[in-house]
Image (cartoon, rainbow, N blue to C red):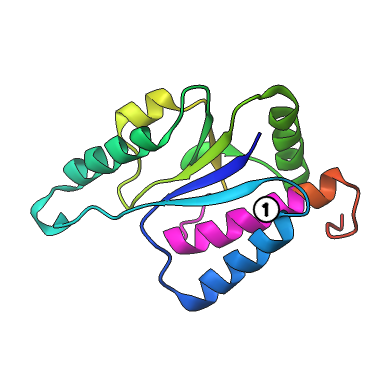
Amino acid sequence: MKIQLLVVGKTSTPYINTGIDNYMGRLRHYVPFELRTISDIRNTRRLSGEQQCQAEGELILASLQPGDYVVLLDERGKEFTSREFARFVEKRIATLSRNLVFVIGGPYGFSDAVYERSDDRLSLSRMTFSHEMVRLFFVEQVYRAMTILRGEPYHHD
């Protein structure tokens, strides 16, 4: 079982890339973790937001494997504390034989088909963050979850 983060478009901000790489390096000691990037849709000026969302949705769906447990990072998803998120991940790790895939969509969110394919939705906050910042925050939270599950002192109550 592997945890994957599937994102639309490259992370172009250097300090965010550095942070993501830092936490991904730390995660290797706990769980197989992979960040997978779907290429941005080209010529988006000619597309409506809905058309761009549909095109990205097709690419997201094509990137998933049968049996993947798919969790969308979505503003309407469940909000967890770090400990609750750790328990969520622990339960999935214990029960899944395939990958646990978290998905960050593009600027217009997810298509209906992607929502239908998903198994769960998770919100990091009711606030709005850039898609790049969400990547960093999420990878850090996966790392934090692993330290919580191991009883390590990274998380303080």
- Image x and y of residue 22, in percent: 66, 68
- Image x and y of residue 154, in percent: 84, 60
Give the residue at mark 1: 141
In this view, the residue in front, 13 or 59, is 59
- Image x and y of residue 29, in percent: 78, 54
Residue 62, can we see it?
yes
Query: Which quadrant of the view contains residue 157?
Result: bottom right
Q: Which residues are magenta?
A: 125-145
**Quarter of the image where the N terminus is located:** top right
In this view, the residue in front, 62 or 157, is 62
Amino acid type, mark 1: Gln
Query: Which quadrant of the view contains residue 19?
Result: bottom right
Above or below, 144 relative to 17: above
Please rate how many residues cluster around mark 1, counting C-alpha atoms within 10 Å: few if below 14, some from 14 to 19, many from 20: some
Q: Is residue 131 magenta?
A: yes
Element at badge 1? Answer: helix
Q: Main secondary structure of the magenta part?
A: helix
At 48% from the left and 77% from the top, the residue drawn is 14
Q: Is residue 96 magenta?
A: no
At 23% from the left and 41% from the top, the residue drawn is 55
- Image x and y of residue 137, in percent: 59, 59
At 71% from the left and 55% from the top, the residue drawn is 27
Above or below, 2 relative to 91: below
At 91% from the left and 48% from the top, the residue drawn is 151
